Amino acid sequence: MRINKAAARADFAKSAAKDRRAADGWSSAAKRFAAQGKPDAAKEAADLAKVHRARAKQAENYKFPDER
């Protein structure tokens, strides 16, 4: 079975954009929690933002096996 690379790249771009939005949301939540004096919640939100940024970067930089 052949993979439609153009469609897969579009899906990766869509996934990356979704993860970037989630990372931005968690980043602002971390700032809000820190301002409210909730350091544990702020750290958790910052960690989640970091995870979403990493997922977005991975989706943007994906190389198919024959392109490596």
Image: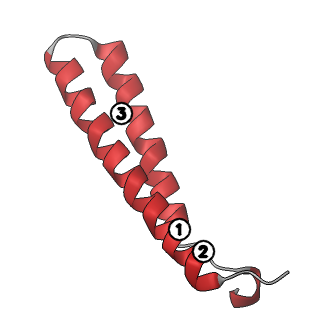
Determine whether 64 is above or below 20 in the image: below
Nearest to N terminus: mark 3 or mark 2: 2
Q: Name the kind of residue labelled 3 in the image.
A: Ala
Q: Residue at x 54, y 63 (%)?
A: 58
Residue assigned mark 2: 8
Determine whether 67 is above or below 17 in the image: below
Q: Nearer the viewer, residue 32 or 6?
A: 6
Residue assigned mark 1: 11
Residue assigned mark 3: 46
Residue that protrudes farthest toward the right in the picture: 1
Q: Position of residue 60 (x, y in %)?
A: 48, 70
Coloration mode: secondary structure
Q: Name the kind of residue labelled 2 in the image.
A: Ala
Determine whether 47 is above or below 23 in the image: above
Say which of marks 1 and 3 sits in front: 1
Answer left or right for 42 relative to 37. Answer: right
Screen quadrant of the C terminus:
bottom right
Q: Residue at x 25, y 29 (%)?
A: 29
